[in-house]
Image (cartoon, rainbow, N blue to C red):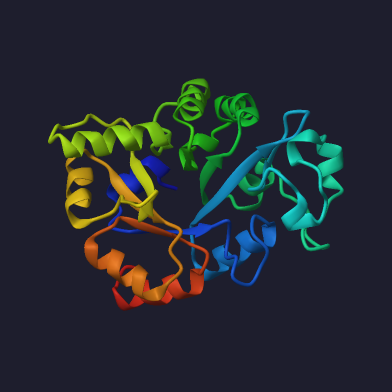
Amino acid sequence: MKNFLDLIRESRFLPFAHRGATRSVPENTVAAFKKAKALGFDIIETDLRCSVDQVLYCFHDKSLLRMTGDHRAIESLTSFEIDRLRIDGEHPIPKLTDIYESFPNAYVNLDAKSEACVRPLSLFFSSTDAGSRSCIGSFSQNRLSRIVKGANCGGVAYSMGTARVLELLTSYLIKRSLHCDESCAQLPVRAYGVSLITPKLLSYYKSSGLKTHAWTINDPSEMQRLIDMGVDGLITDDCETLKAILKINKLW
């Protein structure tokens, strides 16, 4: 199995299953990840939260309310308490270790959602070989940098935090080159009224050695527009539609 860092650098295009195949199955559940793999998606994107006793879980929100009906914050609970909860009354909240064990041939794109994730995620990578099939991300640049440093595993892929994206855009505007150790920029098309993915920006990102993955793209026409523009990957909830469009474009 190819190292994820090499896969990102060498692949013409990569499709990401955002929290699994979530159009028909609840997000961030083993069932959603299984559906994505059954459709042929080799890259699972998921979010990380941490229990009080330092166990990492695949879960997006601070609050459990939207997914489980429980009003508590997930990170205020022990792993014993979290394991008793069910998403939509049916699906357990998976531990991060469950994903690596259940899908040994999958790549995992991780979004560390909180400070609580830093130490256990660093320990997880430094004590296992999971880094070879992982890409680490976070909105917080400080958090991301500490995870990558603490992981202590060479060749691990990681994306840009918000501060580095701002540095990248500033460098573009002042026509300065920027050295990038990151393997990719995973970006929305627009944020706060600012376009982050345009033909000129894509060209600049490529000149900086970055691959560009756009999120979260569910509209078929937008998928095609971004493919035509030259993005290197799309992150989607609608795995079936993206697969169909990639087949048409001979990218599947």
Residue 201: x, y in percent? 21, 49
The quarter of the rendered structure image containing the C terminus is: bottom left
Residue 224: x, y in percent? 31, 71
Number of residue marks: 0
Identify which residue, 128 or 85, lies in the foreground.
Answer: 85
Residue positioned 81% across, 36% down in the render? 77
Residue positioned 86% across, 41% down in the render? 81
Identify which residue, 205 or 3, lies in the foreground.
Answer: 205
Location of residue 129 with respect to 119 vertically, above or below = below
Location of residue 77 with respect to 14 vertically, above or below = above
Q: Quadrant of residue 235?
A: bottom left
Residue positioned 63% across, 72% down in the render? 24
Q: In this rendering, does residue 2 appear at all?
A: yes
Seen from this angle, which residue lies furthest front?
193
Location of residue 48 with respect to 33 vertically, above or below = above
Location of residue 214 with respect to 160 vertically, above or below = below
Seen from this angle, which residue lies furthest left?
175
Q: In this rendering, does residue 105 appear at all?
A: no
Q: Is residue 208 left or right of residue 105?
A: left
Q: Is residue 158 left or right of residue 109?
A: left
Residue 174: x, y in percent? 15, 34
